[in-house]
Amino acid sequence: MPGNSVELEFQRIKDFLKLIGLSENEMKIYLLGLERNKMSSGDIVSSLEISPQAASDIMKKLAAKGYFIPEVHKGKRGAGRTGRVYHVVPPSQKFPELQGISSVMDRIDEILENMEDTGVEQGFLELRKEETAHSILIDQINNVNNEILISSNDCSWIEYSSIIRCLSHCAQRNISIKVAVNNASTETCKILESLGAKVYLCNSAVSPPFIILDNKLLFMAFSTSQYSKRYGLLQLDNQYLISKFAGLFNSMIREVERNE
């Protein structure tokens, strides 16, 4: 059904906007813009429960971030001035990396559901034992040549001294380390920065957390127990999936850089 298809697409866009840190009102306004193509702050006030001042402020903020383009009117002398009508920038132009993210997550869910405890399938390796996962991850980090991208919520993995040591060793080898965090403490961020990592404070959590090594390997954490905080890793070397998650990571840090 077309209606259901459109609704699903809008939900997919909304989920992505949450990942990169837009507020609830910013998401509502951008989605309204997608429905109308162009609109003014008055249209927002009449359609959403947002005050005129807030609508105007948010529209200006979103336009500055590239979500909308202000319509320009010509004055009597030909000088351009910015009007109050804004044209929405479609997701395909604003977020080319959005394409395929949902299918990627669906594929990963399917793999987790269907693979056996020690299964290997088409570049997917499921590591359910936390100790084994930890050991393999350390080995792979130590073999990095260029770049490490880490997306994590609270960086609780920092309690492992072996991970701290290998990240420090990587920094000493001039490996680029970028960490996108959502709910990490100030102390944790300082520890990461002392290791030589560039830390990006994002507004929204990303699930599941992931690590990309040299754009060749992707590790994703998943819970292995309903009753305790035990985690395994999904190791992937599928370049399509890696490119999608690298695009998601870069979108998150670009959003942070725009707001700095």
Image: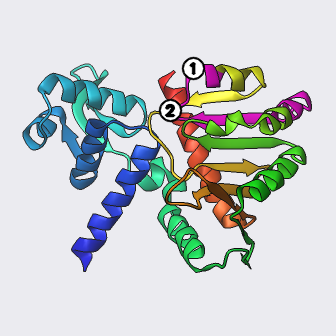
Percent x, y of residue 70: 31, 33
Extent of the magenta region: 167-189
Secondary structure at badge 2 equals loop
Please state which amino acid type lies under the numbered disc 1.
Thr
> How many residues crowd around disc 1 within 10 Å: few (fewer than 14), some, or many (20 or more)?
few
Nearer the observer, 56 or 155: 155
Give the labeled residue for mark 1: 186
Percent x, y of residue 216: 79, 57
- Residue at 73% in and 28% down: 197
Nearer the observer, 146 or 71: 146
- Residue at 28% in and 31% down: 59
Q: Is residue 249 rendered magenta in the image?
A: no
Q: CA distance from mark 1 to mark 2?
A: 9 Å
Nearer the observer, 88 or 230: 230
Please state which amino acid type lies under the numbered disc 2.
Asn
Secondary structure at badge 1 equals helix
Q: Is residue 251 visible?
A: yes
